[in-house]
Image (spheres, rainbow, N blue to C red):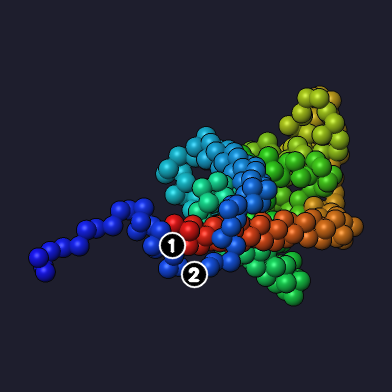
């Protein structure tokens, strides 16, 4: 019959016919286009960042839960920049996201994750370079900003336990007291000389970390800085001095500020800082190059599969 349908060719015959019609694709050999060395190098490298970021994130969340309630966190919303755990959370989150996208993109050969990974690293690198140029070009304004920030840190010394630990560690390590000197602690409500009106034992004092050799003592003397900035003619000062003699501890404190010590350290270690920043930039550039190389291999393998199947 004229209208009778023609028999449908076998599937194998269809595949042979289709393969005979396609053109030659460069690199469409019998071996995989994806380099196992590049693939698992990217994966192994990002596993480290994934675990590091996850650990920092967990530690930051734990620190926030331990010291803050939700209501307390809302009340300190305007002073979040004084909380040392927030930079930890931000760095941990970024490291976690970068490591996760790199791991999934390399292990699962997912070009979307690899593109996101490369883009994030590129944006981070641009932000770091821009911050470095801005810091050098506007170093005078940056110096004023750091001074104001450190003044806020002194004021909020007792408001955050992590901030208090950070300041004490800085003063003990650099053997300094306050921002420009010990009198900077008069900005703090607890150590202000005016706190004598409420009979505060810390009035006119400084934190224990300002005391000389406080870091070398096996047992910390948290009272060594009480009243050391009060004038000798003050009756309260004489009472505090007598109490200090009874407790047999010294009232000697560091008089140099921490900001000059920080500036001196930066000037003496400028090469170390520059090398460290260069190493970080090189690691990011290598991460971008390896990810793009792996992405190209994956696309080549997909093209090869398309032309041979």
Measuring from the top left, give residue 254's x and y in whole percent: 85, 45
Measuring from the top left, give residue 36's x and y in whole percent: 64, 47
Q: Is residue 192 visible?
A: no
Q: Residue at x 70, y 61 (%)?
A: 285
Local packing at callout 2 (Cα closer than 10 Å; few below 14, some 14-19, many 20+) is few
Q: Is residue 261 above or below residue 211?
A: below
Q: Quadrant of residue 247?
A: top right
Disc tally is 2
Residue farthest to the front, as pictured: 1
Q: Quadrant of residue 270?
A: bottom right
Q: Quadrant of the C terminus?
A: bottom left
Q: Residue at x 50, y 62 (%)?
A: 303
Q: Is residue 185 visible?
A: yes
Residue 19 badge: 1
In terms of depth relative to the viewer, which is nearer, 113 or 123?
113
Q: Which residue is disc 2 drawn over?
A: 23
Q: Is residue 79 above or below residue 191?
A: below
Measuring from the top left, give residue 1's x and y in whole percent: 9, 65
Local packing at callout 1 (Cα closer than 10 Å; few below 14, some 14-19, many 20+) is few
SS for dot 1: helix
């Amino acid at each position: 019959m004229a209208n009778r349908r023609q028999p449908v060719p076998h599937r194998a015959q269809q595949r042979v016919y289709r393969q005979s019609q396609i053109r030659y694709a460069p690199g469409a050999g019998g071996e995989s286009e994806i380099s196992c060395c590049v693939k698992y190098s990217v994966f192994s490298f990002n596993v480290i960042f994934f675990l590091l970021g996850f650990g920092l994130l967990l530690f930051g969340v734990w620190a926030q839960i331990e010291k803050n309630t939700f209501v307390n966190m809302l009340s300190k919303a305007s002073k979040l920049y004084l909380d040392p755990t927030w930079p930890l959370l931000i760095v941990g989150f970024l490291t976690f996201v970068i490591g996760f996208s790199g791991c999934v993109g390399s292990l699962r050969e997912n070009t979307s994750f690899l593109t996101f990974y490369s883009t994030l690293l590129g944006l981070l690198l641009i932000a770091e370079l821009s911050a470095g140029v801005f810091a050098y070009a506007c170093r005078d304004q940056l110096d004023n900003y750091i001074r104001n920030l450190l003044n806020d840190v002194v004021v909020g010394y007792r408001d955050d336990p992590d901030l208090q630990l950070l300041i004490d560690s800085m003063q003990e390590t650099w053997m300094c007291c306050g921002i420009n000197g010990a009198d900077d602690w008069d900005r703090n409500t607890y150590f202000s000389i005016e706190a004598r009106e409420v009979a505060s034992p810390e009035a006119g004092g400084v934190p224990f970390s300002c005391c000389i050799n406080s870091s070398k003592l096996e047992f910390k003397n948290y009272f060594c800085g009480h009243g050391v900035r009060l004038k000798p003619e003050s009756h309260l000062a004489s009472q505090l001095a007598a109490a200090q003699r009874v407790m047999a501890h010294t009232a000697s404190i560091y008089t140099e500020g921490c900001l000059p010590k920080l500036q001196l350290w930066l000037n003496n270690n400028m090469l170390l800082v520059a090398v460290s920043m260069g190493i970080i930039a090189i690691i990011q550039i290598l991460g971008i190059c390896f990810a793009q190389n792996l992405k190209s291999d994956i696309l080549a393998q997909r093209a090869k599969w398309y032309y041979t199947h």
